[in-house]
Image: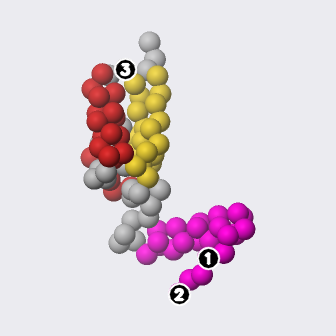
Amino acid sequence: MTKKKVLLVAENHDLASGFGTYAKNLLQRLHDSGKYELAEFGIYANISLGKNVPWKFYANAPEEDDPQDQKIYIIVILITSSVHGDSIRLS
């Protein structure tokens, strides 16, 4: 029998917020059941937060100590904003 796949898109499991706590508890319970193949898209998270969890982890924030990651992140924000007609002013 194949496991059902679950992707949780929420504030990351390590964030000290109500949603972060909810994500951590939900993911841990689902993992402990052994019934699911889990993945988390962690909002406000960089990839290093996913190194210590037993499920797949996808991040949406750059690594703080990686200038190349920071540069790519800024470019993506600028492209996304221009597509939506927003203007961003860099100081």
Q: Along the polypeptide, which appears first: circle 3 or circle 2?
A: 3
Q: Along the polypeptide, which appears first: circle 1 or circle 3?
A: 3
Q: Which residue does the image show at 30% across and 22% down from the upper left? A: 33
| The residue stretch that appears in magenta | 67-91
- In the displayed structure, 32 sits above or below 58; it is above
Magenta includes 78?
yes
Give the left or right position of residue 64, taking residue 91 as reference. left
Which residue in the structure is indicated by mark 1? 88
Label 2, residues with CA under 10 Å away: few <14, some 14-19, many ≥20? few
Which residue in the structure is indicated by mark 3? 35
Observer able to see residue 54: no
- In the displayed structure, 71 sits above or below 61; it is below
Which residue reaches farthest front?
Answer: 18
**Disc 2 and disc 1 in contact, CB within 8 angstroms:** no
Q: Position of residue 62 (x, y in %)?
A: 44, 64
Under tag 2, what secondary structure?
A: loop
Q: Which residue does the image show at 44% across and 12% down from the upper left? A: 1
Q: Position of residue 27 (x, y in %)?
A: 34, 35
Amino acid type at circle 2 is: Ser
Observer able to see residue 8: yes
> What is the distance, in whole Å, between disc 3 and disc 2 at their CAs?
49 Å
Q: Position of residue 31 (x, y in %)?
A: 31, 29
Which residue in the structure is indicated by mark 2? 91
Marks 1, 3: nearer the viewer:
1
